Image (cartoon, coloured by chain):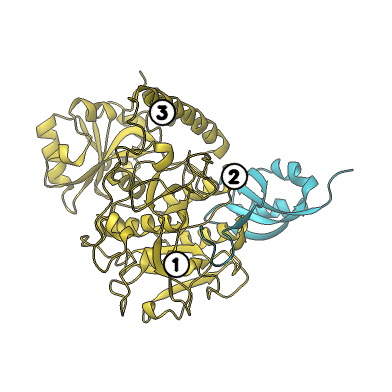
């Protein structure tokens, strides 16, 4: 069996991931994130409790670590960034694959390491690997279905619908936003959509950075962008009898208009929007848009990798071209790129929304009957779609990003997936499950 | 007859050359460059469809695709 040790090459890690099956986006190694200032103590504790072979990045000239030279090491620590890399074997033999298992005050979290594809990798080569992985996952899912008892199919084991919290939308309640102590402060959230109603009363006094790539002013005469931005970043307490509908109410809003007031746009416009969001170091890039039926676009795959390399995460709607249960279509671009987090939609009864696309899905959010801000004069309305599920995930991503500066890019993606609430549906419908706020 | 119709194209680069150099070579080959997107490592613009294969052979170019439209539907669509 191929190994996921510290010195393994990318090829060896990919091979090991394919042999393991399951989630092939993980390398098999683990990242230990230490609390601020906790690395020295944490590393000492790990060494004494688990007799690890340890190495420190400071042992290498100018901390330019060559992982191949650390092949025999169980844990390699990086003091500058407060994290350590643990080999898959070390994690498995000590049963140290979760934060809880560490049982150590100085450990913030233990998360699987994910593959990150730099621009130097030809995306087509990677996609061939991804397709092989997809075939294996599909084969596994088919086996699981065969093993199910009659009558226990998807749906019968769904958790009870969420009780409604007074003054809060069902979507926010379902993703556990009301009890969260985080509000998105200091986190930049880019919403690439039809713009925003810049005079909306619920956002009076809120600083908003905006840019247009659609050949029209940012002002949203469509309504879609005002709705999705509202879900991701709407206020804690809207005035009047309006319930709370926004997740990260103190996040810094970056509005990029990439779709015109008719709801249309191009790939080039959306790439320009992503480029702007990365240049502005937006930790979260929310894209409630897509091209149904489009094959994976190398440009989006590259953009997703570039985003993660710069500490950003692209979150995109899977699409609404399905008509369940009869028709389930695959997610379109950009959501179908392996480097983009793809969001499916669920209903308040905790079922998959009939329109929600499948296959390449990473996570799910509330997307049916979602109340949020809208262009004036209506100012608020209820809409449905994976477009509405996406900003629930984006808002939660902002809260997680606020909870730890280590949670950026691939680490943020991993945390969202690891903490999602499991749902009794195939991963091809809901991915890891329903997103949860920290 | 080769296809001389002008199309909107998206060029994905591999990042092993400065993106401006790739853009220069594309221009020299007849690509009307509109955006050089440094962070996402893509170049967008217009060119005859018949030249796509030629652009693909330029060093640093990973892929050339026809720009695809995005449409979330008109205002007030039931599902978006």
| Residue position marked by numbered label 2 in the rendering | A293
Q: Is A382 drawn above or below residue A318 in the view shown?
A: below
Residue placed at 43% from the left, 31% from the top?
Answer: A10
Tag 2 secondary structure: loop
Q: Is A396 drawn above or below residue B17 in the view shown?
A: below
User: Badges 1 and 2: C-beta atoms under 8 Å apart?
Assistant: no
Q: Is residue A123 left or right of residue A15?
A: right
| Residue position marked by numbered label 3 in the rendering | A141
Marker disc for residue A429: none
Residue placed at 26% from the left, 69% from the top?
Answer: A167
- The alpha-carbon separation of the residues under discs 2 and 3 comes to 22 Å
Nearer-N-terminus badge (1/3)? 3
Q: Colour of chain A?
A: yellow
Res A111 quadrant in image: top left
Residue sitting farthest toward the top? A1
Shown in cyan, the chain is B
- Co-location on one chain, circles 1 and 2: yes
| Residue position marked by numbered label 1 in the rendering | A227
> Disc 2: which chain?
A
Q: Is residue A243 left or right of residue A275?
A: left
């Amino acid at each position: 069996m191929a190994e996921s040790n510290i010195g393994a090459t990318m090829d060896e890690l990919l091979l090991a991931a394919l042999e393991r099956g399951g989630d092939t986006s993980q390398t098999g190694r683990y990242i230990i994130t230490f609390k601020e200032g906790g690395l020295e103590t944490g590393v000492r504790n790990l060494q004494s409790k688990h007799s690890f072979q340890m190495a420190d990045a400071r042992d290498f000239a100018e901390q330019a670590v060559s992982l191949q030279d650390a092949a025999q090491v169980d844990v390699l620590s990086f003091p500058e960034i407060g994290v350590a890399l643990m080999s898959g074997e070390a994690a498995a033999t000590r049963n140290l694959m979760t934060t809880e298992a560490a049982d150590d005050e100085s450990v913030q979290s233990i998360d699987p390491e994910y593959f990150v594809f730099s621009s130097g990798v030809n995306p087509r080569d990677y996609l061939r690997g991804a397709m092989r992985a997809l075939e294996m996952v599909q084969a596994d899912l088919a086996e699981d279905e065969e093993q199910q008892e009659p009558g226990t199919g998807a749906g019968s084991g769904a958790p009870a619908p969420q009780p409604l919290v007074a003054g809060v939308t069902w979507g926010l309640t379902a993703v556990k936003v009301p009890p969260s102590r985080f509000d998105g402060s200091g986190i930049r959230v880019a919403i690439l959509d039809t713009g925003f109603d810049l005079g909306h009363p619920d956002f009076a006094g809120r600083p908003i950075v905006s840019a247009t790539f659609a050949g029209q002013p940012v002002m949203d005469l469509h309504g879609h962008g005002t709705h999705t931005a509202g879900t991701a970043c709407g206020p804690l307490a809207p005035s009047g009898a309006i319930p709370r509908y926004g997740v990260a109410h103190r996040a810094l809003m970056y509005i990029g208009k990439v779709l015109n007031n008719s709801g249309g746009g191009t790939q080039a416009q959306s790439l320009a929007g992503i480029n702007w969001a990365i240049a502005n170091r937006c930790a979260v890039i929310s894209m409630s848009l897509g091209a149904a039926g489009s094959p994976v676009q190398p440009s989006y795959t590259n953009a997703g990798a570039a985003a993660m390399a710069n500490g950003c995460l692209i979150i995109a709607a899977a699409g609404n071209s399905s008509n369940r249960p009869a028709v389930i279509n695959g997610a379109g671009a950009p959501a179908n790129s392996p480097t983009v987090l793809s969001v499916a939609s669920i209903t308040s009864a905790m079922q998959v929304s009939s329109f929600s696309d499948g296959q390449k899905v990473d996570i799910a959010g509330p997307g049916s009957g979602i109340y949020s801000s809208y262009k004036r004069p209506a100012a608020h309305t209820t809409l449905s779609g994976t477009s509405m599920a996406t900003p629930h995930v984006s808002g939660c991503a902002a809260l997680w990003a606020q909870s730890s500066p280590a949670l950026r890019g691939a680490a943020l993606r991993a945390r969202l997936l690891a903490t999602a609430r499991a749902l009794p549906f195939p991963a091809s419908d809901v991915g890891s499950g329903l997103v949860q706020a920290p | 007859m080769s296809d001389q119709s002008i199309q909107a194209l998206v060029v994905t680069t591999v990042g092993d050359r400065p993106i401006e150099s790739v853009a220069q070579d594309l221009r020299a080959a007849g690509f009307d460059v509109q955006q050089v997107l440094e962070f996402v490592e893509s170049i967008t613009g217009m060119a005859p469809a018949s030249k796509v294969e030629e652009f693909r052979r330029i060093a640093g170019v990973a892929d050339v695709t026809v720009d695809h439209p995005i449409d979330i539907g008109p205002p007030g669509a039931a599902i978006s």
